[in-house]
Image (cartoon, helix red, strand yellow):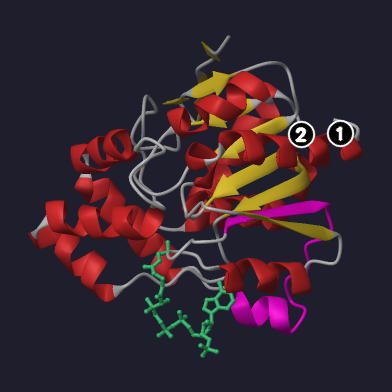
């Protein structure tokens, strides 16, 4: 059963979905919300946040990935103290920042279809303003392997608020820890599971392999016949990888 447990951060409502009791918190990708994790909440359990300006959460002024990380860390403190932080795409950038900026809240990471740098195709950013339909179609073409895995529902969600999708993708475009990982300025020391769909064109396998190389206590799981929306496209394979990782951590 999934329930809503809304909390407050600095006087603003932050909406959280809760599956079974488990110390894992999921962060959604650009223009999405906590419902993206319904298969994980039902099966693996844990918590999924609606970032500010998304889903049922209140609006807030967000100017960087670090701003999102602040809200997530506060949410973790309130719902379970500390957690494995699992993030997809934009959410994966936020998860890295939670781990680096608020290490007291992060006992492990799951980095899904994400990267140490997340440049976005300029045509997507430009078209989202002028022709959102066209831009969203392009994102989905690259983000799904075929048209399964809830293609239609994701499309509907993106088109509901193309301004927020644009803001999120602009934040991704400016997110860049690539050199910091390379020169050792960024050090992730918690156990880390990296998951990527073999066919991911938005955050290709190369990005995941970069994490594997630079995060010492990490393992990489590549899911076949899936693209960027791997948690929706291949929930069983995805959940069993997360389950195995959590069990190994004793969670
Ligand atoms: N991990 C490891 N390597 C990375 C990386 C990451 N997260 N991000 C970039 N790189 C590498 C690239 O592979 C490239 O290496 P190369 O020179 O050996 O080929 C180099 O760093 C520079 O790449 P990039 O930052 O991507 O800049 P670019 O000017 O080459 O390309 C885009 C820009 C937008 C065309 C390209 O990033 C892209 O196709 N992105 C995917 C599509 C997209 O919009 N994704 C949305 C993500 S939210």
Residue 6's x, y, as percent?
A: 50, 17
Please give left or right for residue 28 compared with residue 212 in the image. Answer: left
Question: Is residue 187 rendered magenta in the image?
Answer: yes
Residue in the picture at 72% in, 49% down:
109
Residue in the picture at 21% in, 48% down:
162
Residue 86's x, y, as percent?
A: 64, 43
Residue 176's x, y, as percent?
A: 53, 73
Q: Is residue 35 visible?
A: yes
Which of the labelled discs sits on residue 59, or is there none?
Answer: none
In this view, the residue in front, 109 or 139, is: 139
Dot 2: within a 10 Å radius of its alpha carbon, few (fewer than 14), some, or many (20 or more) residues?
some
- In this rendering, the answer to whether 225 lies above or below 27 is below
Please give left or right for residue 197 compared with residue 58 in the image. Answer: right
- In this rendering, the answer to whether 41 lies above or below 97 is above
**Tally of marks:** 2
Q: Quadrant of residue 40?
A: top right
Please give left or right for residue 2 compared with residue 107 in the image. Answer: left
Q: Are marks 2 and 1 in contact (CB under 8 Å)?
A: yes
In this view, the residue in front, 227 or 109, is: 227
Reading the image, the residue beneath label 2 is: 243
Q: Secondary structure at mark 1?
A: helix
Q: Alpha carbon of mark 2 to alpha carbon of mark 1: how far?
A: 6 Å
Residue in the picture at 67% in, 78% down:
180
- The quarter of the picture where the C terminus appears is top right
Q: Quadrant of residue 236?
A: top right
Residue 126's x, y, as percent?
A: 18, 68
Please give left or right for residue 194 compared with residue 42 in the image. Answer: right
Question: Is residue 55 rendered magenta in the image?
Answer: no
- The quarter of the picture where the N terminus appears is top right
Which of the labelled discs sits on residue 247, or is there none?
Answer: 1
In this view, the residue in front, 198 or 101, is: 198
Give the residues in magenta.
177-197
């Amino acid at each position: 059963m999934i329930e809503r447990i809304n909390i407050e951060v600095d006087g603003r409502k932050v909406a959280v979905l809760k599956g079974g009791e488990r110390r894992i918190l999921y962060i959604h990708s650009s223009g999405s919300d906590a419902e993206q994790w319904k298969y994980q909440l039902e099966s693996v359990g844990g918590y999924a946040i609606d970032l500010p300006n998304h889903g049922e959460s209140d609006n807030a002024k967000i100017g960087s990935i670090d701003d999102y990380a602040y809200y997530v860390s506060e949410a973790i403190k309130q719902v379970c103290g500390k957690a494995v932080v699992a993030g997809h795409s934009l959410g994966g950038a936020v998860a890295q920042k939670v781990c680096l900026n608020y290490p007291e809240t992060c006992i492990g990471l799951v980095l899904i279809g994400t990267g140490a740098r997340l440049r976005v195709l300029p045509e997507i950013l430009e078209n989202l303003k002028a022709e959102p339909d066209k831009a969203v179609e392009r994102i989905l073409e690259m983000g799904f392997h075929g048209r399964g895995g809830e293609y239609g529902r994701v499309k509907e969600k993106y088109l509901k608020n193309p301004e927020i999708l644009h803001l999120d993708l602009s934040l991704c475009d400016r997110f860049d820890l690539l050199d910091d990982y390379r020169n050792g300025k960024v050090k992730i020391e918690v156990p880390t599971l990296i998951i990527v769909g073999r066919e991911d064109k938005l955050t290709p396998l190369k990005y995941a392999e970069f994490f594997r190389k630079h995060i010492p206590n990490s393992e990489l799981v590549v899911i076949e016949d899936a693209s960027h929306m791997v948690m929706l496209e291949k929930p069983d394979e995805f959940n069993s990888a997360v389950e195995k990782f959590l069990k190994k951590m004793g969670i």
